Amino acid sequence: MKWVKFSSDFAGSDGKQHALLDNLNQDLSQKSVLLGDGLKPSVADIVVFATVQAFVSRVSDGDAQKFLHVLRWMDYIQNTVDFGSTLQKINVAKSAFDPPSPPKKAEKGDTESSSKKAASGQKVADKTNASADSKKPVGEAKAPGNKETPAAKDNKTSGEKKKTQDKSAGKTSEKASEKVPEKTADKDSECNISILNIQVGLIRKAWKHPSADSLLVEEIDLGDGNVRQVVSGLAKYCSPDDLTNRHVVLITNVKPGKLRDVMSAGLVLCASTEDHTAVEPLLPPEGAKIGERVSFAGFDGKPEDVLNPKKKQLDKITPHLRTDENGIATFKGIPFTTSAGPCRSSIRNGNVK
């Protein structure tokens, strides 16, 4: 949440970006990534990268020298995370790496000395093994005539049983470990925002539902002659005139169905307060193209053709949709992004569904 707040401050603080970048530069002076001690980028890295990328790409070479740790981090992130065509790579000047010369080979005298030490060590090990053999329990020794004693047979049998049990346990654990990642992968895919086809649309017409006072019907243009009819529960919050010629953001791969006998083929995404006293459709930025797909940094998968209602995929994703303190719509802190910028709402810190 610290880095989500940083991203919000950076996006909404004109003139303070240099100071915020300086703080980020200091924070990265001893790190490869923002969270954890390892090298794996986190969601925080992706969010902050997407936020500062446009600004950093415009700074002068002189200013860039002040943020060397930020540049080093950004170069690592953009070459580790696949942003597709959403963000352009930043050119980072790197000095050539001159590896040190290999160590000199040991001289002949040193080699002979090492060989002698190894040989003497081997002799000591052989003596130790011989001593250990002489101290074995009586049950493990063989009787005259190379016949095994009853005690030795019992030990051998129990040893073989133990080995068989160990192998069976090993196979069971291997099968269990093979199944776990599959279940985890399925669970992750069901909560992956990329399965949704979220597009920018323009409401051409809106009218009251003929048989439901709480519903409105909208005719939404998605470009290229693609027009959808969508039923929304907005009658309490918006009039048909408020929605006409308004740009909206909608999910277009929900399964079409009838709401009170009127066909609906989409879901207009709206922000709302916690008590649901205020609800309004998300607003794409001016300049966003009708029909373009809303993207999320780090989530570049293809959307499903039609969502399966039985899987309740929307129920798993919508709890992670919110507006931040600046009104920017986000999924797990990652902004709803179009070619013209992020989608917004006047409702801050609200739910989105």
Image (tube, grey):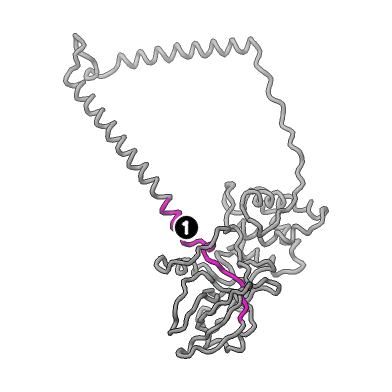
Q: Is residue 190 visible?
A: yes
Residue 250 lies, with reference to residue 181, above or below; the image says below
The residue at the far left in this view is: 150
Where residue 349 appears, as percent x and y from the top left, is 57, 74
The residue furthest front is: 225
Q: Position of residue 255 (x, y in %)?
A: 46, 71
Q: Nearer the viewer, residue 145 or 138?
A: 145
Question: Which image quarter: residue 140?
Answer: top left
Location of residue 302 in the rendering, given as x and y in whole percent from the top left corner = 55, 60
At label 1, counting other C-alpha atoms closer than 10 Å, the crowd grade (few under 14, some 14-19, many 20 or more) is few
Residue 325 seen in the current view: no
Report the side of 11 relative to 322 (left or right): right
What residue is drawn where x is 69% and y is 20%?
104
Tell me the quarter of the picture where residue 334 sits: bottom right
**How many tags in the picture?**
1
Question: Mark 1 sits on what residue?
Answer: 188
Q: Is residue 274 above or below residue 140?
A: below
Identify the residue shown where x is 71% and y is 32%: 99
Mark 1: amino acid: Asp
Q: Nearer the viewer, residue 208 or 184?
A: 208
Quadrant of the drawing holding the N terminus: bottom right
Where is residue 351 drawn, in percent x and y? 53, 74
Residue at 60% in and 12% down: 111
Helix, strand or loop at mark 1: helix
Instruction: Determine whether 272 is above or below 160 in the image.
Output: below
Q: Residue at x 69, y 50 (%)?
A: 75
Tell me if 306 is positioned left or right of 32 in this view.
Answer: left
233, above or below 195, in the image: below
The magenta-colored residue range is: 182-203
Find out whether residue 288 is within the magenta segment: no
